Amino acid sequence: MRRKGNKKLDMLARFVRARRRSLVDASPGIHSCILILDGLKPDFNIGKIFRVADAFSALEIHLINVDFFDPDPAKGSVRWVPFSSMKPLTPVLARCPGADISA
């Protein structure tokens, strides 16, 4: 699986594999906290945010304008926390309970 000299392809392959596992194993947390991460770069510790969301049993994570990230720093939390990747923010807000969209 390791591709010599292309870290971006390696990261993308790990992300795709982690995303498939998440679709199978993840279940919403017990708290109603929903994390919305907008416009983070792949190396902005997204994996650590997943670990915190897993520890506090957040309901889900929405990644806005994030194509992929390295799931290795998450230490497996990507598998247990449901997440979705989207481009615009409006569909995410429509799915959030109690969100007031008046734009």
Image (spheres, rainbow, N blue to C red):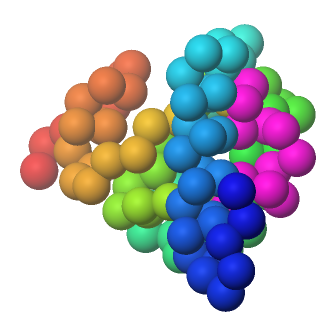
Closest to the observer, 99 or 7? 7
What x and y, as percent, mark residue 63? 46, 51
Q: Is residue 73 magenta?
A: yes
Tell me which residue sits at (39%, 20%) in the image: 97
| Residue 103 left/right relative to 15 | left
What x and y, as percent, mark residue 86? 32, 47
Q: Is residue 73 above or below residue 22?
A: below
What x and y, as percent, mark residue 65? 36, 62
Tell me which residue sits at (43%, 62%) in the image: 66
Closest to the observer, 11 or 51? 11
Which residue appears farthest toward the bottom when viewing the image? 5
Stretch of the chain drawn in magenta? 70-80
Closest to the observer, 41 or 99? 41
Q: Is residue 5 above or below residue 33?
A: below
Q: Is residue 65 magenta?
A: no
Q: Quadrant of residue 60?
A: top right
- Which is the main secondary structure of the residues drawn in magenta? helix
Q: Which image quarter holds the N terminus?
A: bottom right
Which residue appears farthest toward the left when viewing the image? 103
| Residue 17 left/right relative to 38 | right
Q: Is residue 18 above or below residue 81?
A: below
What x and y, as percent, mark residue 78? 71, 38
Q: Is residue 8 visible?
A: yes
